[in-house]
Image: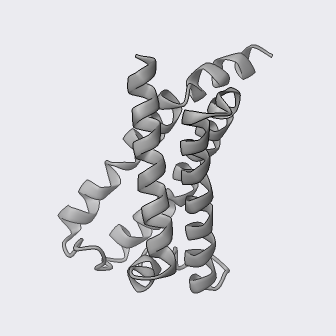
Amino acid sequence: MALIKSLLALLLGAFLLSAGTSHLGSNRTEFLAQVPTWLPLDPDFVVIASGLVEITLGALLIITALILKKYRGVIGLITAVFFILIFPGNINQYVNHLDAFGLDTDTKRFIRLLFQPPLVALALWCSDGLRLLKKLKQI
């Protein structure tokens, strides 16, 4: 089971590295569609900042899957919180009927919303963030 968790943490880290890099380049305009309209920040800043956070979290997931394992739970917990914090962007895309990433119908945008909770769960499970959460709850 530990090997599966490590492999999934590596895959999630690679996914975040790829997504974060695309925030800064090829998909920058697409990501603008996900910045909530009510957010009082420059949308381009939000895209760049979230991309840098994704790159950092991706690298840390990989590092803690391979070495520095005692920090896996913390990084998984932070990654899960990040996925929760960016969820309003996906809601914004759905509510405002914004096309991006091939999500050109409300049905596709709604289905995209269903993928966020499993990402949160995956980040917590593969990193043992759930175990850390349980420990914190006991304090």
Left or right, residue 113 beside residue 54: left
Q: Quadrant of the C terminus?
A: top right
> How many labels were placed on the picture?
0
Work out whether residue 82 can be spotted.
no
Residue 19, horizontal then vertical, whole percent: 44, 64
Residue 75, horizontal then vertical, whole percent: 64, 40
Whether 50 is drawn above or below 100: the answer is: above
Residue at the limit of the structure toward the top, as seen here: 138
x 42%, y 86%: residue: 29
Residue 134, horizontal then vertical, whole percent: 65, 18
x 44%, y 52%: residue: 14
Whether 38 is drawn above or below 130: the answer is: below
Left or right, residue 109 beside residue 14: left
Q: Quadrant of the N terminus?
A: top left
Whether 50 is drawn above or below 122: the answer is: below
Splitting the image into 4 quarters, where does residue 80 fall? Answer: top right
Work out whether residue 71 can be spotted.
yes
Splitting the image into 4 quarters, where does residue 44 fall? Answer: bottom right
Residue at the limit of the structure toward the right, as seen here: 139
Residue at the limit of the structure toward the front, as seen here: 67
Left or right, residue 77 beside residue 14: right
Pick the front one: 115 or 72: 72
x 43%, y 63%: residue: 18
Residue 138, horizontal then vertical, whole percent: 74, 13
x 37%, y 77%: residue: 96
